[in-house]
Amino acid sequence: MFGSADLKLCGTALLLVLGVLANVFNLVVMLVRQWRSGVVKTVAVIICFISLGNVLLQISTFVLVASVWAGVLCWPDLPFFFCVVLFVWLSSSSVSFWSVAWLSVLYCMRVLSFSSALFRALKENISAILNVTLVVTLLTSCVIFTPFFYLHFQSKTLAPKNTTEKAACMIRKPLFPAWIDVNAYVIIFICYLALLPLTIMLPTSLRLVVFLCKHTSSMQRKQSGSHAVESYLLVCRLTVALVWVYLTTLLTISLYYFHAIFASGLSADMLFLGLSFYCAASAILLTCSNKNLRERLRVLLCRGRNTNTLVRSAEEKSGVTATV
């Protein structure tokens, strides 16, 4: 019989495989599409950032789970590769979260109408602005988490004589160097990682919800609608769903940390499971929302069905020949 820990591990592994496959598919299709077209499209760039960030996030999540399971936190010295994995874990999650926020901004700017000349200019140049913003986001995410390279253990860990070795290992926590103000730095990176993207996502997603309600009701009154409008409404709905997936993940992470502060602490498997769910769900929503990704997935599925049909027909022919 499987225990609760085994079920959590299996669930995380299943979401890990599903998420990596879906994100790699999105990344490869978008890169090939960009290379063939020769034109930089902001939607494709954002999807590439989200997909690449999710792949790195899931790989680093798996390595962290394996490292903690192997007892890295009980070693005499904190290995440098663990610091590197933590850096990749936080940086990739930051890039993915911010890219979701910029995707929501992009679609929100496309549906809004402005009377101000400044905002009209922003709407006309939103693609170029977001392309630059994505590069700045990538660089900022790499810079802000560099202090994690300097994590270390205390030189000595004093434990009571009546405690076991396992209990002594439990109190070994990585520490930042003395020149870093831990409280200020934690506030800064939490705001950058979660709160600032949230302040961007909530207004834009709510505006998309208002847009969806208005146009859905108007289409119901007219009882007709063009295919282009229906496709765009689908994109907006899936973008809103993507934002709510992020909010669910953020709630899971907050619950984990608040429980760790005010109670005995939840298992880290819950945190890893929430991040794995975010990567898999966001990849599936991106595939459904983008026309090129949907068409490519449909081609792959049809090709697989045709291959199975040919194999079955060949087997039936060979069986008939053998019978004759």
Image (spheres, grey):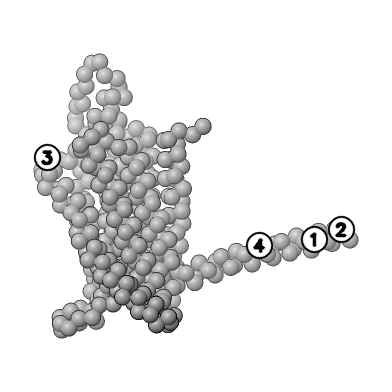
Q: Amino acid at mark 1?
A: Ser
Q: Amino acid at mark 4?
A: Asn
Disc on the earlier residue, 2 or 1: 1
What label sits on residue 308 in the rendered view? 4
For numbered disc 3, what is the local secondary structure?
loop
Residue in the image at 36% along x and 68% along y = 237
**Label 1: how many Cα within 10 Å (few below 14, some 14–19, many 20+):** few
- Quadrant of the image containing the C terminus: bottom right
Residue 287: x and y, percent? 43, 65
Relative placement, left or right, of 129 versus 10 is left
- Mark 1 = which residue? 318
Q: Is there CB contact under 8 Å for labels 3 and 4?
A: no
Q: Is there CB contact under 8 Å for labels 1 and 4?
A: no
Label tally: 4
What label sits on residue 178 in the rendered view? 3
Regarding residue 31, the answer to whether it shows in the image is no
Residue 21: x and y, percent? 46, 57
Q: Is there CB contact under 8 Å for labels 3 and 2?
A: no
Residue 256: x and y, percent? 27, 42
Q: Is there CB contact under 8 Å for labels 3 and 1?
A: no
Q: Amino acid at mark 2?
A: Thr
For numbered disc 4, what is the local secondary structure?
helix
Q: CA distance from mark 3 to mark 4?
A: 63 Å
Disc on the earlier residue, 3 or 2: 3
Q: Where is 15 relative to 234, above or below?
A: above
Q: Is there CB contact under 8 Å for labels 2 and 1?
A: no
Q: CA distance from mark 1 to mark 4?
A: 15 Å
- Mark 2 = which residue? 323
Q: Quadrant of residue 111?
A: bottom left
Residue in the image at 23% along x and 59% along y = 198
Name the one closer to the observer, 65 or 206. 206
